[in-house]
Image (cartoon, rainbow, N blue to C red):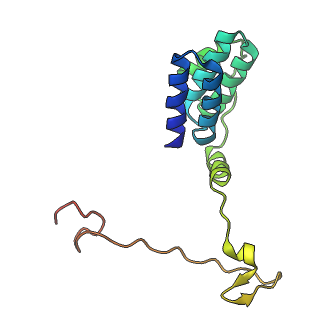
Amino acid sequence: MRGEVHVGKARALKLMDRKAEAVVEFNNALRYKFDSPDVFLALADHYRDTGDRQRALEMATEGLKHNPNSKGLKRRYTEFGGKLPYPEAVDKTMLAEESKEEINPEVKPEAVTGEISGQAKDADEPMAPTPPAEPAKIGTPKNPYCRFCPD
């Protein structure tokens, strides 16, 4: 949701002719929506409008790596002087994991204190993973997942 907020803010800033601030917001949106073709298209168009065709080509190339089927990015790539074949797509599963680690780094209390359940932790002893807690079931016995749906 944060990425959409940054995109909306960037579009509003662009309409208000505050383009430098809009670029900052589009770049912030890329942190959360790294695979959105709209953000790459908007950045490529901005750089084209400012006369920086090299940077516009870089944005179109990067966008095609994340969205190989985007017709708009393909058109801009060739328009800005990109050579065929188009850039190869990147593995989205790796990017999703990297962005999750970057946005929400998990800090375990054991790593901070060095203790587990009141006992000192040895450096050689492997740490056992804790099972995830099951969410509480809501609703009726026949439909435990929706409290609004009738039996």
Please indicate whether residue 41 sits to the left or right of residue 83 in the image: left
Q: Residue furthest bottom?
A: 119
Query: Would residue 84 be seen by someone viewing this image from the given angle?
Result: no
Residue 44 in the image: state x and y as whole percent: 64, 19
Q: Is residue 84 above or below residue 114?
A: above
Residue in the picture at 30% in, 70% down: 138
Please indicate whether residue 108 sits to the left or right of residue 139 in the image: right
Residue 32 in the image: state x and y as whole percent: 59, 42
Residue 114 in the image: state x and y as whole percent: 76, 79
Q: Is residue 35 above or below residue 125?
A: above
Residue in the picture at 70% in, 27% down: 87
Q: Is residue 80 above or below residue 102?
A: above
Q: Quadrant of residue 24?
A: top right
Query: Would residue 32 be seen by someone viewing this image from the given angle?
Result: yes
Please indicate whether residue 150 sits to the left or right of residue 35 in the image: left
Q: Quadrant of residue 43?
A: top right
Residue in the picture at 55% in, 33% down: 36
Frontmost residue, 130 versus 108: 108
Total numbered circles = 0
Residue 16 in the image: state x and y as whole percent: 53, 17
Q: Quadrant of residue 89?
A: top right
Q: Residue furthest left?
A: 150
* Quadrant assignment for the C terminus: bottom left
Residue in the picture at 44% in, 74% down: 134
Q: Residue furthest right?
A: 124
